Image (cartoon, coloured by chain):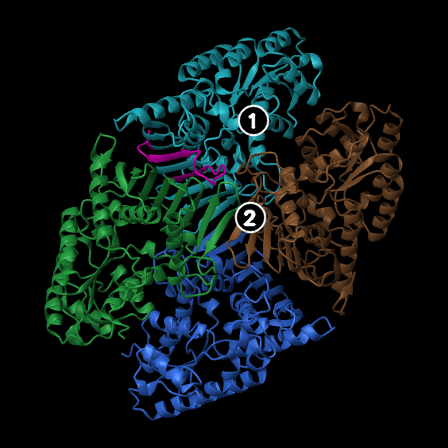
Chain colours: A blue, B brown, C cyan, D green
Amino acid sequence: MKQKLRLGMIGGGPDAFIGAVHRIAARIDDCYELVCGAFSSSAEKSAQTGAILGLSPERAYPSYQTLIETEKKLPENVRVEVISIVTPNHLHFEPAKMALENGFHVILDKPITLSLQEALALEKIQQQTGKKLLLTHTYTGYPMVKEARQQVLAGKLGAIRKIYVEYPQGWLSTAVENKQADWRTDPSKSGIAGAMGDIGTHAFNLAEYVSGLSVTKLCADINTVIEGRRLDDDGAVLLKFNNGASGVLMATQIAAGEENNVKIRVYGEKGGLEWQQVDANSLVIKWLDAPAQTYRTGGAYVSSFASHNTRTPAGHPEGYLEAFANLYRNFALTVLAEMNQQQPAKEALDYPGVTEGVRGMTFIEKVIESGKSSQKWINF
Amino acid sequence: MKQKLRLGMIGGGPDAFIGAVHRIAARIDDCYELVCGAFSSSAEKSAQTGAILGLSPERAYPSYQTLIETEKKLPENVRVEVISIVTPNHLHFEPAKMALENGFHVILDKPITLSLQEALALEKIQQQTGKKLLLTHTYTGYPMVKEARQQVLAGKLGAIRKIYVEYPQGWLSTAVENKQADWRTDPSKSGIAGAMGDIGTHAFNLAEYVSGLSVTKLCADINTVIEGRRLDDDGAVLLKFNNGASGVLMATQIAAGEENNVKIRVYGEKGGLEWQQVDANSLVIKWLDAPAQTYRTGGAYVSSFASHNTRTPAGHPEGYLEAFANLYRNFALTVLAEMNQQQPAKEALDYPGVTEGVRGMTFIEKVIESGKSSQKWINF
Amino acid sequence: MKQKLRLGMIGGGPDAFIGAVHRIAARIDDCYELVCGAFSSSAEKSAQTGAILGLSPERAYPSYQTLIETEKKLPENVRVEVISIVTPNHLHFEPAKMALENGFHVILDKPITLSLQEALALEKIQQQTGKKLLLTHTYTGYPMVKEARQQVLAGKLGAIRKIYVEYPQGWLSTAVENKQADWRTDPSKSGIAGAMGDIGTHAFNLAEYVSGLSVTKLCADINTVIEGRRLDDDGAVLLKFNNGASGVLMATQIAAGEENNVKIRVYGEKGGLEWQQVDANSLVIKWLDAPAQTYRTGGAYVSSFASHNTRTPAGHPEGYLEAFANLYRNFALTVLAEMNQQQPAKEALDYPGVTEGVRGMTFIEKVIESGKSSQKWINF
Amino acid sequence: MKQKLRLGMIGGGPDAFIGAVHRIAARIDDCYELVCGAFSSSAEKSAQTGAILGLSPERAYPSYQTLIETEKKLPENVRVEVISIVTPNHLHFEPAKMALENGFHVILDKPITLSLQEALALEKIQQQTGKKLLLTHTYTGYPMVKEARQQVLAGKLGAIRKIYVEYPQGWLSTAVENKQADWRTDPSKSGIAGAMGDIGTHAFNLAEYVSGLSVTKLCADINTVIEGRRLDDDGAVLLKFNNGASGVLMATQIAAGEENNVKIRVYGEKGGLEWQQVDANSLVIKWLDAPAQTYRTGGAYVSSFASHNTRTPAGHPEGYLEAFANLYRNFALTVLAEMNQQQPAKEALDYPGVTEGVRGMTFIEKVIESGKSSQKWINF
């Protein structure tokens, strides 16, 4: 029975933050073997990175096209099976399209593409090719986020009435952009949104994932706080959901002093729940007439969705890299199940894909449109 | 030198929550002696309450009019000096007006009146009579809220860019209204707003107090979540401030499981601060490039505004009643200073009054207007 | 029906910290009227304090003897009923004895006396006179500490196995003693113990109160960390309880940076509970196989012992002064019930008295003895 | 330049908890390639595990002896370089000895051996062979634990006066032992200590590591709370350090409801610091006269020892597996530096080894001796 997938990577060269994170995530649970990469648009840098990672020199490619074309010709038991694309947003669509069309499964960092149009096109390609696609909305990989969703879906909170989701960061508080900031504030690389694309989409995804609801309209206040910056670095959004619930989404990159404290609160008729990354292994559920409870990663009482995504006993904290690894692992389990002609576990199937990607791009388009509009509500 | 003020109370009979709180607040620092009251519209209940409180029977009046008229005729060294009005909103204006016009200082629970029109009229009366007025926006009485304001005013955070303020409650999560809920959800007693008037005004006041800024426009999503309720029980508001900063105000009474966790976060160029009632004696200041600091009530390093409003050594928590008492004490110190022909300390003068009352009523009018509007921004 | 007690105070003059706290505690619930005092051994200072507090000049006495003798001769409906003694430890026994023997109820700050011998003598006197005595072990006045005890007594945790109690302070971290430190580090005023008497007794009392158990033997490491200090400023104690449980008590005044973070943890067969003053309105109960619960002051689900000692709705924090006021109020309710020929409520009877005082003095004697001994265990 | 070490594993077969943790730790930073193993005393189980892990069948050995002997004969560029031993305590010494003597570097789970005698023998062997040894005291791998040590060593807190260290667990609260509990409570496999060996040594190591001090004597209360258990499951220890500081160590496995909340507090003349695993990415430093500071993993202001051991930006929590991986990575960097004839960075050299192992075994011997003694202090 096949237990490991051959992985290739596009992007993730020297100085790239998220590429290294993807590689750690891929390694943690030993479901992938990195066999090739096109790590940089510079052939030299790609080769360097390949050498550092211990790849065969001939499989450190100078471009993603070469990677896909060459790998495709390798024997089936040698060639790459899953391609992870960790380039800036403007370099998502083309490699993803080419990979899918050439028979490879794809892992994509969010947001899925540069535009909604591209996302819809990619959705169609994915459906036509039947290849699988993982979109790395990391926060949905946390066991306690999964527990939150299960509690809501099981009706423990009753009908949902209010959702608050927030993602405050402070790292773009000054005008000087670093390497990471550079492309994120460049419309040609990042798309029409800055903060809303980079972290607003995470918050949006988290709200829909945990609540099981869909946003139907929104009203946004979108700001560029730092003078001269070309994209938004701050925003707040009033939300309406398909069941009549309302919500607020706050995402900012100019909250000086904040790290990455993404947080969600969901309130229903009977109680509310609260999760935040800074205390990622706790899920607080507050009840209308009973003491609040703190669910913990590794607790004997959690759902199978939470325990499936946990490696260590309660009290030994798992963090961001493990959440990321959960996405990789679940995707691998799903792909491997198919290869092994088995049914993947429902827990393994719980990973974000192209549908979430299209929702995220719709959010970006709508939120930016709303930011410019004098009309209050913009329908989804 | 006079050290204590004679206090009368209008409202605050049996079952009244806030009247008892006002009386404790008045007692804590021994600046007031309760000498009379018109505690209920029922003469019998007023007399009962007076007896329980140890008043002379003749000074437990059957109505506020009788109280004011009778006390006015008492000798100067006997008659009441400050009248505290703790009735529902629709019974604020008339007794306050009559008290001021008859030479008494006034303490009023918030919101100041039933309507903006009344508030503006009361402002004029207060200015004409020269009598003082305290509006009990309790949360500004907390030492760490005062510290927050001082940090902002001293420029420690740099120019302010973002303000988040929230007041989630859950006690109106069900349709059954109790005694306290009853008048708060009755437009004839509460005014045009429910949650926005009851707690939204607190959040609004906190935002303007801590930041030293003024809201100039807003965009609100106002909801009545519980079917059949006659006023709003939930809302979220996008804010713009006079220096260009933006903000979000969230106030809800249907967040099942929440208590009274009012919280404010203010971010400037150099850092951000965070205060919440659940940990009222801590003020967290997060810096762009240095470890966050936790200022604590009673710390040797806090501003005079914080230490002036503290009674116990650091680590012995002071709470809501002490915050309330700070308002009463500062008001007394100000009134007594005038009586003693002294200059009140600047720390004593730091209490909310008619100006904050007018701001609060403007907020209520605008936020409800915005809630009904399809236009995005409503100017203040 | 009598509703208020006439209170006198011995000690609590200018600069006295704890006297002012006692007076606030007495005022909060309006169960006492301060009618007289011997606030200082200086007649002048006593008179000054009396004037500030608004007493009749003739009832601000130059000595506690004069107070007791003079008040005794006043008409029954005028003379003081309860005498609060807030002097340093060496001035507890004589005034308490004289007050009890002359028919007055007594409130005493802890530790009850200078020595165990005095405590035992006072116990006998109290039993003979039948007058009531309140010992202000403040921390047992917190609603969530009462809830903790109720949970243990109700067997929710099963048989108790382990108790950790700690009281870290940092205010004596330097050699320079201030006014408050001065008498606390002087054996002639404080007795044989410094930190162990000042805060160790609080921790000890808390452990026995919450667990319902009694210490039977102990092994102590007692230190004087600051050179030249005449009494202990630090200690740690291994404990054995009468049911076989073991425990650890840590009390120190040289933990630089600590405020007054008294904390207790009690573990039984089925779960453990945790309370600490810094988050005084929360009681965390951790279960063996279920999510931890957070009980909150004001919660609808708490025991009558907790709700009886609460004034404000959940989420409006009550603090140290309210805990102190709970002791005063319960003592008043007990004394008044007797005067009114009623049965006091069981919740009112739940206050510390002479029994706890004798236990505390025994602890002091044993812990200091153990500190000097090379033998491991000292029996109680 | 060599960048990766060939790793072998002894122990860590099916159902072994810590073996899987070691393997993840080894994978995270890509410094090791697992090439062989003797995963179980059952040849079949060893082969199964090897297959699951993707090893060549011939390198899944039936015993550690075979592994060492066979690997030794393999060509230098093929054979294993580092052997990780993750068996129960009684199976540490022999394989470690054989590995070192045959030229392999060794990684050992703690406690280092079954007895102090073995530990001293192993120390001598290690010194004689010159091979390196890593002892996986995981908690010293946390970036904020390293920061704590650096703050202390840099004198920021002044001379250290008091150390509290605790490790409460609840998983052995009932008499029924599971697979993990089984060997830990069996003297023939675990040695003379249960809880003291399993987690007491971690707490002890943490205290000495963070403070830079050495324990010189101790006084212990050692208990077996669960009837019928053959080793201690609970203990508390008074400590004296070589600079005159005192401390308390608490370790228990019967604190029902606790997870793995290891915590340390160290107080000096100028301030105190606090770290606990439940909030592993924060280090709180409390100052005598200034606001407390919260240092955070990934903060721009932390020492090189903290930043060297961090992979993700501040706010993306790293946890237990990353702390474990830091040990593996630093050991690899040290071993590789030697192979590459370079000087390892001082940050890489900061890993626990045989010296810490001997200290830990001394602690175990002394703490158990003290537990049985009626004498108060036992010298180290």
Amino acid type, callout 2: Asp
Image vertical order of residue A77 relative to residue D367, above or below: below
Image vertical order of residue A105 relative to residue B141, above or below: below
For mark 1, give the secondary structure: helix
Name the chain under label 2: A
Binning the other alpha carbons within 10 Å of mark 1 as few (below 14), some (14 to 19) or many (20 upward) gives: some
Question: Is residue A38 at all visible to an observer of this figure?
Answer: no
Name the chain under label 1: C
Binning the other alpha carbons within 10 Å of mark 2 as few (below 14), some (14 to 19) or many (20 upward) gives: some
Task: State which quarter of the image contains the N terminus of chain B.
Answer: top right
Q: Which residues are magenta?
A: C238-267
Taking the spot 36% from the left edge, 62% from the top edge, the residue there is D322
Location of residue B341 in the rendering, given as x and y in whole percent from the top left corner? 81, 30
Location of residue B278 in the rendering, given as x and y in whole percent from the top left corner? 57, 47
Marks 1 and 2 share the same chain: no
Q: How far, Cα to Cα, is label 1 from label 2?
A: 38 Å
Question: Is residue B270 at all visible to an observer of this figure?
Answer: yes
Residue that badge 1 annotates: C18
Q: Is residue C247 left or right of residue B198?
A: left
Instruction: Name the mark on residue A289.
Output: 2
Q: Nearer the viewer, residue C172 or A7?
A: C172
Amino acid type, callout 1: Ile
